[in-house]
Amino acid sequence: MVIEVRPATEFEDVRTLVGPKRPDASVCWCLSHRLPSKQNNALHGEERGALVAEMCRSDLPPGVLAYDGDEPVGWAGVAPRADTQFARSRRIPHLDGPEPWCIWCLRVRPGYRGRGILRPLLAGAVEFARERGAAAVEGYPVDNGEQRVDLTMAFVGFRSLFEEVGFAKVADTDAVAGGIPRVVMRRELGA
């Protein structure tokens, strides 16, 4: 399997990874951390998908997709931290240095899990940010060691995965996912 990571410009492919089975359902669409809380809470049903479609057509797509050939198999939400909920977070510390982009969600489609998609997906998200001028990228994964993580909370990623892609732990947080502490992982991208 050769994984190619591309900007999330194909709405139907984004829908495949993060959209609901019913278009009128008010599910995440990976907007919960991307939008200000008030805007996120005001969007219902098909409005959520319509906003994601608009984002896919914009100069800053909502993230990246991993492909196996033409099949979308993975998703990563990535954007400038200033444009996300993390800009206002009291649980995730703000660190000195260049304003980072952040990666807040990693997802692999059922049936494709366990095939080595996460590493190239995360690396592709970093490259997406670099190509758009990011000087640093952060993620806020769980620091689970060998502890098992509930799949519903695994979307934040794992410290070990971020380390494999060149990130370093730079801070603890007051946040948890599934009862497991989250940490700030950062990768400086340089000039």
Image (spheres, rainbow, N blue to C red):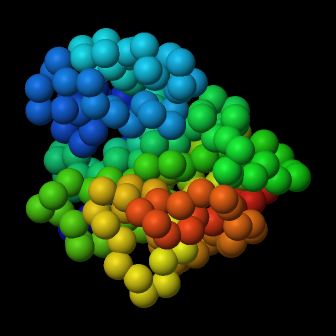
> Which residue does the image show at 51% across and 37% down from the upper left?
33
Image quadrant in which you'd find residue 55? top left
Relative horizontal placement of residue 189, taking residue 29 as reference (left or right): right
> Which residue does the image show at 17% across and 18% down from the upper left?
24
Q: Which residue lies furthest to the front in this view?
A: 179
Residue 57, can we see it?
Answer: no
Residue 85, can we see it?
Answer: yes
Q: Residue furthest right?
A: 96
Q: Which of 130 and 142 is in front in this view?
A: 142
Residue 4, horizontal then vertical, whole percent = 34, 54
Q: Quadrant of the N terminus?
A: bottom left
Q: Nearer the viewer, residue 56 or 89?
A: 89
Residue 26, horizontal then vertical, whole percent = 26, 24
Residue 147, horizontal then vertical, whole percent = 41, 82
Residue 76, horizontal then vertical, whole percent = 42, 48
Image quadrant in which you'd find residue 119? bottom left
Relative horizontal placement of residue 101, taking residue 8 as reference (left or right): right
Q: In this view, does 80 lie above or below 1?
A: above
> Which residue does the image show at 23% across and 73% down from the upper left?
114
Relative horizontal placement of residue 130, taking residue 142 as reference (left or right): right
> Which residue does the image show at 62% across and 71% down from the upper left?
166
Q: Is residue 31 above or below residue 163?
A: above
Q: Nearer the viewer, residue 38 or 101?
A: 38
Total labels: the figure holds: 0
Q: Nearer the viewer, residue 24 or 82?
A: 24
